[in-house]
Amino acid sequence: MNEAKYEDDESFWYYADGSGNIYAGEFKTIKGKKYAFKDDGRMIDGLHFIYANNARIYDESNVYLGTYEGLIVNDDDDSAHPFDEEDAFLESAIWYERNGYKSYYFGGGDDGAMRTNKTTVEIDGENHNFYFEKSGSNKGAGITGEKDDKLYMSGMLLKADSDDKYQVIVEQTTYAKDAGTNNIYKSTVYAKMDTDDFFNTVLQARDVDDETKSTSFGSVTTKKNKDLAEAYNLPDGKDTVNTDTRVNGVGIVTKYYLVNTSGKIIDSNTKSKDGNDYYIVTSKSKVLSAFMLRTNSLYD
């Protein structure tokens, strides 16, 4: 069935129907559980990104080429897009999502049964919280988006480390035109963003008065900022941290969120102090208000 694996003395599970036909290149429900089989018939176990049956294929210029009949299965040590540790998973997941792949988890070892709903997945010796679709045509696929006030990327929960306390999440939705049909389609991905990167690339640093420890944001001067060290806000003339570059429906929409150590989106008009003593202001709309202060001790 697979000469290279045979020569390496590796063994795999296969499944044949009553006539001896091997299942291959498909998802299959067997005795109430759903499994997946590679194009050579091997049963899949563990975490994988899969390009599913009838997935639409595009070339590098976004020209529609047709559909693929079968399953393209990528393992976690794929040389081009590995996902064998957390940072690699989140980075590679962006490429996979944009190219029609979805993440799936089939248990460990000889299990092979597709997992759905909330599931713990071990990556590089550490447990991570995942959420996989429970039903529908995408049953078993890791969700990308918001679920129960939490954000997921290819199934992985996006949350802050305990030391950081809070994590900035950037959402990027790309609207592109299919050159073959002229239809506009969109794809959304999420990524963690370092706090320093956020205020250095998105915000504008504000001067802090050494004597009064106050700073001005346009026409507004902060009050009673004790031991204020740094301050950042939107560039002058902007009223939102979000951006929309679409022209005639084509472009990129970018939004920013703040999540805590449980992954919950901070969706109240409040100040949240992270592990580096930055106070990050959020609004009730769940997106960042783009107002950051760093103090040595106290912010009033």
Image (cartoon, rainbow, N blue to C red):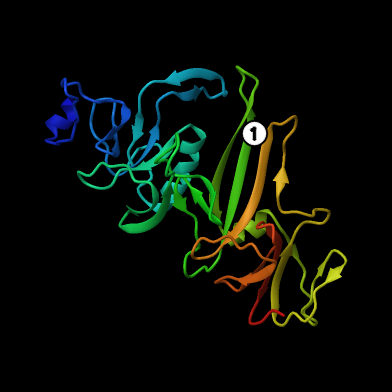
Q: Nearer the viewer, residue 130 or 2?
A: 130
Name the residue located 53 percent from the left edge and 69 percent from the top edge.
Answer: 165
Q: Nearer the viewer, residue 23 or 161?
A: 23
Q: State the residue lying farthest toward the front.
A: 32
| Quarter location, residue 140 | top left
Q: Position of residue 106 (x, y in %)?
A: 30, 43
Q: Quadrant of the C terminus?
A: bottom right
Viewer-nearest residue: 29 or 279: 29
> With 157 as the anchor, is 246 left or right in this view?
right
| Vertical comparison of 169 with 215: above or below | above
Residue sitting at 19 percent across and 30 percent down? 15
User: Badge 1 is on which residue?
Assistant: 175
Screen quadrant of the N terminus = top left
- Check the image and report above or below for 212 versus 201: below
Q: Tell me the quarter of the picture where residue 26 sits.
A: top left
Q: Is residue 285 above or below residue 50?
A: below
Determine the secondary structure under disc 1. strand
Kind of residue sitting beneath label 1 = Tyr
Q: Residue at x 69, y 79 (%)?
A: 299
**Residue at the (35%, 37%) spot, across then down:** 79
Depth check: give the residue in front, 224 or 189.
189
Tally of numbered discs? 1
Residue found at the far right of this picture: 219
